[in-house]
Amino acid sequence: MAIEIKDLSHIYSQGSPFESIALSQINAVIEKGSFIGLIGHTGSGKSTFIQHLNVLLKPTSGQIIIDGVDINDKSTNSKSVRQKVGLVFQYPEHQLFEESVEKDVAFGPENLKLDEKEIKARVKEAIITVGLDYESIRKKSPFELSGGQMRRVAIAGVLAMKPEILILDEPTAGLDPKGREDILNVIKELHDREHITVILVSHSMEDIAKHVEKIMVMCDGKIKIFDTPENVFSQVELLEKIGLAVPQVTYLMRKLNEMDPLVNPNVYTVQQAREEIIRMMRRRKDA
Ligand SMILES: Nc1ncnc2c1ncn2[C@@H]1O[C@H](COP(=O)(O)OP(=O)(O)OP(=O)(O)O)[C@@H](O)[C@H]1O
C-alpha cells in the first residue's frame, strides 16, 4: 500500500491578517518501500507537508491515505499513525534529554508499553543500525558525544519505534562532509535492508541525488516535479528558475555531451575540455 495525497492544502492562520498558504492542492502517490528525496527552497512547504504525514498538522482541506486509511478520519487513532510514521526533526539531537544513550533510545518503546526484553532488544538493534558501538556507548551521556554521534542516537530513538515510514528533515544539516555521507549511508542501508519507505528532506541536490529513487521538488506549496533523479536533473532550466542548483556532476555531463564530436563538430582537445570545465566551475562558484 502507498501513501496517497489527495488535494492536500494547508493554510496557516486562515482568516486572519497573517494568513499564509503553505500547501496548495497537492496530489501524489508515494509507493510503499520507496526512497524519496524531498527538495525545495526555504519556505516552499516541505516541513508543513511532512508534518501532515504523521498528523502533527491537519489539512485545511484534502486527504492523506496511508495503507488505505484516512489518517485524519475521526475513527483513526493518531497514536497508531505516529507509530507507523517516524519523523526525525531537524537537529534532533536537541531533543535528547536522558542521562544515558540507552535510556534516550528506549524512551519511545517505553511509551508503547512494550515488555522490558523487547525494549532492550529494540534499543540494541537501533543503536547498531545507526553505526554506533552498542557496548561502549550505551551507558554514556548523550552530551559527551560528538555532533554526528548525537545525531545518530536521536535517529536511533525513532528507529526503535520500528516505523514503516521514516521521514527525516534535513538529517545532514550542520554536519561535515564525512558526517553527512555517513548518515546518508546509514539511511540507505536501512532502506535497502528493511524495505521501509523513506522520505528524506534536503536542501542539497548533491546529498540526495546519489541515494534516492525519486525526487519530489516543491515550490510555493506545490509539487513541481516528482520523478527519477535523471528526469529531474534533465530539467535544469526549470530547477534554476525555482532557485535550485542541480549537482555539479550534471553540469559536467552536459558539458561533456556538448563536447562530444558526434554532437558538436567543434571538437575539443582534452586540454581544451579541461580548461572549459574549470572555467565553468569558477563561473558557478562566483555566481
Ligand atoms: N507556524 C506557522 N505559522 C504561519 N506560517 C507558517 C508557519 N510555519 C510555516 N509557515 C509558512 O508556510 C510556508 C511554508 O513553510 P515551511 O516551513 O513548510 O517551508 P519549508 O520548505 O519547510 O522551509 P525550510 O526549508 O526553511 O524549513 C512559508 O511561507 C512559511 O512562512
Image (spheres, rainbow, N blue to C red):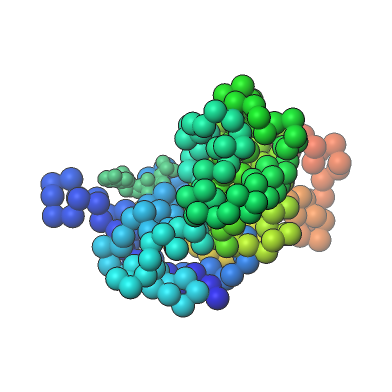
**Vertical comparison of 226 with 98: above or below:** below
Between residue 83 and residue 123, name the one nearer to us: 123
Residue 134, can we see it? yes
Residue 204, can we see it? no
x and y, in percent, of residue 199 in the image: 55, 56
In the picture, the quarter occupied by the C terminus is: top right
Between residue 73 and residue 218, name the one nearer to us: 73
**To which quarter of the image does residue 171 belong?**
top right
In the picture, the quarter occupied by the N terminus is: bottom right
Q: Residue furthest front?
A: 116
x and y, in percent, of residue 130 in the image: 68, 43
x and y, in percent, of residue 10 in the image: 29, 58
**Vertical comparison of 261 with 103: above or below:** below
**Vertical comparison of 247 with 264: above or below:** above
Residue shown at the point (48%, 40%) measured from the top left: 90
Residue shown at the point (80%, 37%) measured from the top left: 274
User: Left of 283 or right of it: where is 73?
Assistant: left
Q: Residue furthest top?
A: 144
Residue shown at the point (75%, 34%) measured from the top left: 135
**To which quarter of the image does residue 260 belong?**
bottom right
